[in-house]
Image: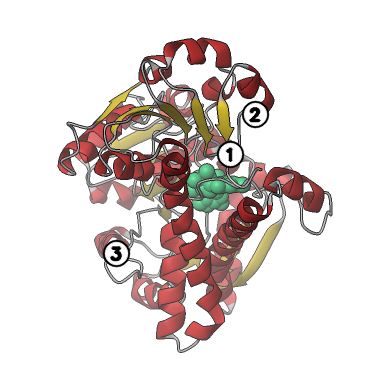
Amino acid sequence: MKISVIGCGYLGAVHAASMAELGHEVVGIDVNPHRIDSLQRSIAPFHEPGFDALLLKNSSRLTFTTEMSAAADATVHFVAVGTPQSADGSADMTYVNSAIEGLLPCLSDGDLVVGKSTVPIGTAERLSEQVQPTGAVLMWNPEFLREGFAVEDTLSPDRLVYGVPAGDDGDSATAILDEVYSEIIAKGTPRLVMNFATAELVKVAANSFLATKISFINAMAEIADVTGANVTQLADAIGYDTRIGRRFLNAGIGFGGGCLPKDIRGFVARAEELGVGDALSFLKDVDDINGRRRTRVAEVLTEELGDLAGKTIAVWGISFKPDSDDIRDSPALDIAESLARAGATVVSADPEGWKPAQARIEQSGLSDSLTTTADHRAAAAGADALVVATEWKVFQGENAETIGELMSGNLVVDGRNCLDAESWKAAGFRYRGMGRA
Ligand code: UDX
C-alpha cells in the first residue's frame, strides 16, 4: 500500500520507517529541509535506539520530501505533526490545520486520512467535515509511543485505537487501516474501535493518568522527606498490589519531555472551554507537584552546602529521560539552569543531550556559568557536589570511589533515586535521595 506521513518529528519519522518495515511504500513529508535531508540519507535527525538501522533497512521503500504534492500518489495519509503548547496552555493547532489544508488538494475518492497528533477533543469531527468533500475519509488513531522505545512501541503497540466516523464510512475506514496494520493485528494486538471523541480522549487520559501516577509518588516523597519514610520502599510495597502496579512510581525530579507536561495543560484548557474545568482541577495539582520537584534539588544542595554562589556543581543528565537527546521541558536542564542562576558554576554531562542544550544555554545568557559535556567524569572533576538528574545506565553503573577521587566535595544528590545508595555511602559520600530518609 502507498502511504504518506505528514510531519517527520519523533512520531512521524518513526511511523514512516515502521510502515516501510511492514512492507508499505512510504513518503515522509515535512516542512523542515534539514530534517528531510538527513532522513533521505537514512540518518536519524534525533537520537532514538534502533531508528537508524530501521531507516537504512527500509531505504528502498522510503522517500522523504518537503513537497506536499508527493502525497497525491498515496491512498493512506498519516498526519503526525506537532501540537506544541500555546502561551495560554492550550494546544497550538497551527501545524495540524496547515497539514490538512495542504493535503486537501492531494486527496482522492476512497483515500484515508489518519490523524495521529495529540489534539483537543472535537478536532477530528471538525477535520472530518473538511476532508469529506474530497471523497476521502478521516480516522483518528492516537499514538502512545515512548521516546527511547519508539520503534518497539510503533511495531508492537499495547493496543491500536481507531476513532471512526459514524456509519458506513467507519467500516470502510476500519478495513483500510486493518490492511495497513495487518502484521501488527496478526500478532494478536488488541484493536479498539470507537467514536472520534473517545479516541481523542484515550490519548490525553492515558498521559494524564501517567502524569498523575508520577506526581502521586512525588507527593509521597514530600511526605517522606519530613517524616523519615523511604519513598522507594513505599513504592515497592504499594506496587505489589496489582491494582496499583510498580511502573511509573519512581519518585524524583518529576516528568518532562514533549508530551506529558503540555498534554495535561492542553487537556485542562480544553475542559475549561467545554465548561467542565472542575473535572480536571486535580491536574493543576499534578502540574504543581511536578514543578516543586524541580526546586527540591536546589533546596537539598542549600541544606548541605549553604549558599550556592561560588560552588561548583556537576549535573549528570540533560535529556528529559535516558536514551533520548530530547531536552524539551527537561527537569535536568531546568535544574542546571536554576543552579547557575543561583551563582553556582555548573557542568552538565549527558551522552546525547549535551549538544542540543548548547544553543538553549547560549540563548538564556548562562553560558559563562553553565557548560555541557558528553564526559560525565570530566564534569565531576573538582565539583563540590554531584547531582544525578537523568538515569542513564552509564551513570548508574559508575564506580563511586573513582568519582569520589575526582571530586573536591563528597555530596551526591540522587534526583532519580537510581544509584545504589549504600555503595556511594561506603565510598565516603554524603548521599541525599528524593524522599529517601
Ligand atoms: C509519554 C508517554 O509515556 C507515551 O505513551 C506518550 O505517547 C508520550 O508521552 P515519553 O514522553 O517518551 O512518553 O516519556 P515517559 O517514558 O512517559 O516519561 C515521561 C517523564 O516522566 C520522563 O521525564 C521520566 O523521567 C518521568 N518519569 C517516568 C518519572 O519521573 N517517574 C516514573 O516513574 C516514570
Disc 2 crowd rating (10 Å Cα; few below 14, some 14-19, many 20+) is some
Q: Nearer the viewer, residue 267 or 250?
A: 250
Amino acid tagged 3: Leu
Left or right: where 313 falls relative to 48: left
Quadrant where the C terminus sits is top right
Q: Is mark 2 on a helix, strand or loop?
A: helix
- Residue at 45%, 74% in the rendered image: 268
Separation of residues labelled 2 and 3 (CA atoms): 58 Å
For marks 1 and 2, the one nearer the N-term is 2
Q: Name the residue under label 2.
A: 421
Q: Name the residue under label 1.
A: 433
Q: Which colour scheme is used?
A: secondary structure
- Residue at 22%, 32% in the rendered image: 369
Q: Is 166 drawn above or below residue 357 in the view shown?
A: below
Amino acid tagged 2: Ala
Left or right: where 125 falls relative to 374: right
For marks 2 and 3, the one nearer the N-term is 3
Q: Do the residues labelled 3 and 1 touch (CB within 8 Å)?
A: no
Left or right: where 340 falls relative to 47: left
Res. 81 mark: none
Picture coordinates of residue 425 (x, y %)? 63, 23
Beta carbon at label 2 within 8 Å of ligand 1: no
Q: Are marks 1 and 2 in contact (CB under 8 Å)?
A: yes
Q: In which quarter of the image is residue 351?
A: top left
Can see residue 137? no
Q: Quadrant of residue 184?
A: top right
For marks 3 and 1, the one nearer the N-term is 3
Picture coordinates of residue 126 (x, y %)? 39, 77
Amino acid tagged 1: Gly
Q: Do the residues labelled 2 and 3 touch (CB within 8 Å)?
A: no
Q: How many labels does the image show?
A: 3
